[in-house]
Amino acid sequence: MAFLNRLKRGFGNFFSFFGESWSELKKVRWPTRKELVSYTIVVLVTVLIITIYFWGLDIGISSIVELII
């Protein structure tokens, strides 16, 4: 009987978690379409800049290693 009580309490916590999560999601201020597009462009440009930086760094280090070898 104790096992069933623990099992019932465990599932109660499980469903309680999802109920509380759903209520928290209702409180979220979701971005507008304009904000979402703006944020996406900022992320893509940042990733592009960092990619170009590390590509240049890789080429530079590769050239130095080839000169040493």
Image: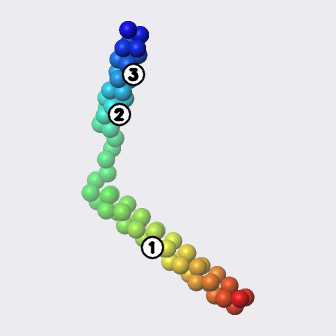
Vertical order, 6 against 62 (above or below) = above
Front one among 38 and 2: 2
Alpha carbon distance from label 2 to label 3 = 17 Å
Which quadrant would residue 11 be assigned to in this image? Answer: top left
Front one among 65 and 26: 65
Q: Label 2: how many residues lie within 10 Å, few (<14), some (14-19) or many (20+)?
A: few
Q: Label 3: how many residues lie within 10 Å, few (<14), some (14-19) or many (20+)?
A: few
Quarter of the image with the C terminus is: bottom right
Q: Residue at x 58, y 83 (%)?
A: 59
Question: Type of residue at label 3?
Answer: Gly
Name the residue tied to disc 3: 10
Question: Type of residue at label 2?
Answer: Ser
Q: Position of residue 36 (x, y in %)?
A: 32, 58
Dot 2 or dot 1, earlier in sequence: 2
Alpha carbon distance from label 3 to label 1 = 47 Å
Name the residue tied to disc 2: 21
Front one among 25 and 16: 16
| Helix, strand or loop status at disc 2 | helix
Q: Residue at x 38, y 12 (%)?
A: 5
Name the residue tied to disc 1: 48
Vertical order, 57 against 9 (above or below) = below
Instruction: Evaluate if marks 2 and 3 touch, with contact meaning CB atoms under 8 Å apart.
Output: no
Instruction: Evaluate if marks 3 and 1 touch, with contact meaning CB atoms under 8 Å apart.
Output: no
Quarter of the image with the N terminus is: top left
